[in-house]
Image (tube, rainbow, N blue to C red):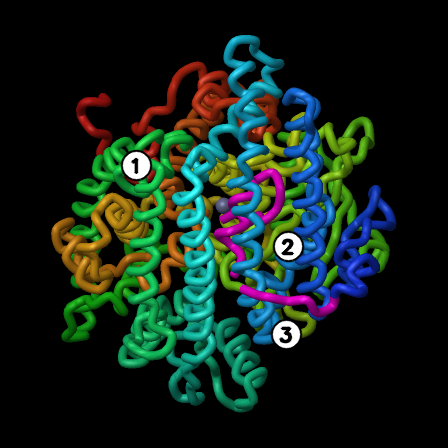
Amino acid sequence: MTFRIKKGLSIFALVSIIGYCNGQENEQNSMNNPLLSEWNGPYEGVPAFDKMKIEYVKPAIRKGMELHLAEIDKISENSEEATFENTIIPMEKAGEELDRAFTYYGIYSSNVSSPEFREVQKELAPEISEFSSKISQNEKLFNRIKTVYERSQKEPLSPARQRVIDLIYEDFAMQGAELSKKDKERYAAINKELSALYTQFSTNVLADEENYVIYLDADQLGGLPESYIKSAAQAAADRGNDGKYAVTNTRSSMDPFLTYSTEREIREQVWKNYYSRGDNGDEYDNNEIVKQILKLRDERVELLGYDNYAQWRLQNRMAKNPENAMDLMMKVWPAALARVEEEVKDMQKIADSQDANITIKPWDYRFYAEKVRKEKYDLDSEEVKQYLELGNLTQALFYTAGELFNFNFTPVEEGSVPVFHEDVKVWEVTIKDSGDLIGLWYLDPYARQGKRSGAWATTYRSYNELMGGKPVLSSNNSNFIEPAPGEPVLVSWDDAETFFHEFGHALHFLSADIEYPTLNSGVRDYTEFQSQLLERWLSTDKVINQFLRHHETNEVIPDELVRKIKKASTFNQGFATIEFLASAIMDMKYHTTDPENIDPDTFERETLKELNMPEEIVMRHRTPHFGHVFSGEGYATGYYGYLWADVLTSDAAEAFAKAPEGFYDKEMASKLVKYLFAPRNAMDPAEAYKKFRGRDAKIDALMRDRGFPVPEENQ
Ligand SMILES: [Zn+2]
């Protein structure tokens, strides 16, 4: 997942991520507020993470918005005829202070959140939404944009400028700039309501993640790996329960527990806690919120003349419309269903052979899948982990970046660049041969309280020529379990892939070569592609031989084990594909169905039934905690994008595999950088892909990668 709240994404994206107010307090010291100040120090300035204080956040965001609006007013009140120079360029430059304030806001909301910050967030969310509406509904501003746009339709601008004006015009039109005054008011009111609901939704999920912790005794640890037990003991101690072992209600704790624990009843409880987040019928229940969100979204796009939210949302995506997205998903669904049936049979067989006397339930899937993996693929995840040490993997990232992008990573001197937590490490990124500076890479590796779960990438400063081409400040964030002192961090194969994935986003930021900030924006069903593709380098021979080494003996991971890992890559693809697709299809169904007829609980159950959802599997994200879709709009009707991007990924990876020098083919690498990474959104994604591949993407390689039969029509 990527996560950005700053410019480069349209200003409107702010609404979706952030959460209300009235305030006058703190106006006095806003100009010497460190969160607004220009960035000083090395690398043409870096964020002053060492000066962050929560009390600065509200006044900084408020002042930042005020300054940005003043700049926008100046642009819209200009009496000269609108041109790219006097309208679009100053728009692109506006909001520097606010961008800086949002950098810190992003850190507080994702990396070091607290109940205190969540209050700030709640208070600011509606103000931010209002701010954003003030820009998107500024009639004078839109008229100027329209003038520039319409003229460009007769007298085209340079390709970069044309792309900028096209994107900006479309964005405004999609946000209701052409609505009547009355409709605009309603539109803004809806956005304000929505932003409060989004915040409430994610706050509820977080509450359920923090409130449900299961404490185990020493005699309940059967099957669990040593590393899990150690961190569970630490997690219990952190919560004041020394001597116990905590299973927290997060994916990184739930997943391994369900995979290894022999305590079936506790597995069931852990499973229920996790998949009931936001669905407990108490003050944190999200069902009613989902209903309201769907109604408001539907009402909003109706104002704009669309049949449903999905139709509105997908018009500027690579998929173009909900039909294309559904079509792709339904092509893959039957093959995945058939595979699940085989997987369950394999698992049931093992359970029967052990006289377990059970029918496979959802809380048994991971546990027996692991046994099948061992039997059929003879692959022991714990053994694999011994060769996946975080430091080595980090070096593997740098090596890959060196080979493909010609980048070099050097650690900066400790203390020379401020960080928001002592665990965060920083590297300088330069061009290998010339030594030219590209930027910095921050890594925040470990899980902690107040940090959101999962892994993500973001930038504190993106590259563009207009603002002087300053060094990119990119960051990766993970939730590896912090080891006891002196112990190595050993990660699973999946987590190692995710580590490469997020680094792919960082490389996408670092390699940007564009003129205007707007061209940094991402196309939702396309931006995951670059990072998914980068995952493929983890299993290349060069990475394996140099970096996948035993943490104690430094021995290279044995060929036999690698062969097994590769063979196992199609393992459990039924489960993985179905749990993902069920969520992606539900996302699309929610936004193509009249919300008057939706009661989330019933709707989820009935839709899954119609799809023949196997009862042994649950959606990867059930509705009441589907944050991608309901804690903002970033991924709403966009969850399918991972599969869309997967099609591109498999297709592009096959091109590398077939190149003369394989994954390290220099010509392919230069095309990769030139067409797929550096242009970001400066080129239409479909066009850029075609330039890279010489044709459109096909679904065949994806089906092969998952071990599914290739549909006949494609053969
Ligand atoms: Zn991602």
Quadrant location of residue 408? top right
Q: Is 138 situated left or right of 33 in this image?
A: left
Q: Main secondary structure of the magenta part?
A: loop
Nearest the eye: 532 or 553: 532
Count of marks, rendered view = 3
Magenta range is 1-26
Disc 1 target residue: 306
Mark 3 falls on what kind of element? loop
Nearest to N terminus: mark 1 or mark 3: 1
Disc 3 target residue: 484
Asked if residue 591 is positioned above or below residue 488 in the image, the reply reads above
Instruction: Give residue 607's position: percent from left, percent from top.
Output: 17, 53
Nearest the eye: 539 or 71: 71
Circles 1 and 3: CB distance less than 8 Å? no
- Can you tell which of label 1 and label 3 is closer to the viewer? 1
Q: Amino acid at mark 1?
A: Tyr
Instruction: Give residue 101's position: percent from left, percent from top.
Output: 70, 54
Q: Residue at left 49%, top 37%?
A: 527
Residue 337 in view? yes
